[in-house]
Image (cartoon, helix red, strand yellow):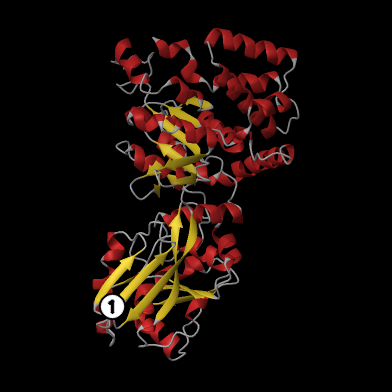
Amino acid sequence: MLVKIYGSAIHGVAAQTITIEVNVDTGGVGYHLVGLPDNAIKESSYRISAALKNVGYKIPGKKITINMAPADLRKEGSAYDLSIAIGILAASNQILAENIQDYIIMGELSLDGSLQPIKGVLPIAIQAREEGFKGIILPRQNTREAAIVNNLDVYGVENISEVIDFFNEGKPIEKVELDTRKEFEDKINDFPFDFCEVKGQETAKRAMEVAAAGGHNIILIGPPGSGKTMLAKRIPSILPPLTIKEALETTKIHSVAGKMGTETSLMTVRPFRAPHHTISDVALVGGGGYPQPGEISLAHNGVLFLDEMPEFKRTVLEVMRQPLEDREVTISRARFTVNYPSSFMLVASMNPSPSGFFPDDPNNTSTVYEMQRYMNKLSGPLLDRIDIHIEVQKVEFEQLAEKRKGEKSEDIRKRVLRAREIQQERYKDLKISYNAQIGSREIEAFCELDEVSFNLIKLAMEKLNLSARAYDRILKVARTIADLEESKNILSHHISEAIQYRSLDREFWNG
């Protein structure tokens, strides 16, 4: 007897429905699995055999042929155990299978028949709804994630026997329902850190506000203990809240990477990723034999923090150049190409020199050559993609001992939101959300300068020997500073402040 059952495969951050055809006949004995399965799927026969035996069923001693269509698409992972097991039982007439084609069935089996959670549940559920399936049957740990998708019945099970009873005896499984919008709104302002906890550093806080308002990349330069990491961790608390669309995009990526907790349904705050400096190229941008999203994609719609940036391998930093511009990363293989979104805000930090001090600090023991070699770890093209360079000075004791709290993240966020609203109104006819995304054409249209501002930036370009890209960055940052003041035109003091945020372009750093 031939039975068709449906599962799903992840391709990038989207899912594709897989038809699992199970044929059982009496012409011999054997177990044949075809359709480009990987080793985890090939090994499923052992898990399925033990699981069925432990719940009172068995794999029949007949010729079993299982085809996973489309046969030219590679299937991977252990998530097909449950669908294959139910297909074998239905094809061998051990259970009824009248409405089995109405459901996507996925789950990894343990030897006792219990189910383990799987990856990529959200894109699987979205695809199931789009293709008109009635429902989806999953391990219970994954149900909150799938329940985000409306107009789809989500059933969570702990053991294969529950699925067998559901189809064979009509024994109901409790549906999981979730008020996604309520849960989203309840947790949208749930931040562990606040800017009011940062003592001093008013200049750095201002630079952070400008960066958040325009979505600009920023690098913090300062000695150890000056508060660079502390400032970076608080950036998500002043960024605009995620929209439902952004939350779904972000959740899909984390779901595919298996980073969603069992108690989490929808990501409600912008991600903050801080990889260690020993990270490899593939771990940062994504890829591998079976491509997975990397840290830059996990930071999509959020913040990627590179602490002590010069300590990262140069090859790792250079592979970020293209994603920083295009806001997506493309992983190419001989048989397929996968695109992962990577629209993130880069926040980096570094010491001013190998000794940890600024060049003019009496405590600095680094030679000019050592400092130059240290700075050369960051290429010019990469630095040009970082809009704001800000020096973070050591906090004086009087500031540390001060009892008065600083400005709250909530108050800074209000100004950031107002600036973003101005930008969205300005770019409503373009596929642009904030100033950091504008190109040369938009700069020409929206960053007009008066004579004083023009002469000021001309002088800065000549004195600092800035590149054409740095010129664009200054104009973008000046546009954001004007938006924070709700000024329609870019004025000279906006340009002046923006030029101050190009610290690493100064001759000061070139010995």
Q: Is residue 394 above or below residue 262?
A: above
Give coordinates of residue 511: x percent, y percent: 39, 9
85 is higher (above) or lower (below) than 220: below
- Rendering coords of residue 50 (x, y %): 23, 78
Looking at the image, which is closer to me, 36 or 118? Answer: 36
Rendered position, 291 above or below 113: above
Foreground pick, 349 / 30: 30
Q: Please tell me in which quadrant of the rendered image residue 377 appears.
A: top left
Vertical relation: 501 (above or below) 421: above
Residue 172, image x and y in percent? 48, 87
Left or right of 239? Residue 46 is left
| Kind of residue sitting beneath label 1 | Lys
Residue 133 located left or right of residue 34:
right
Counting from the top left corner in percent of width and height, residue 63 is at 28, 78
Q: In this figure, which residue is indicated by the disc labeled 1?
A: 63
Q: Residue furthest bottom?
A: 169
Query: Is residue 224 among what the camera can see?
Result: no
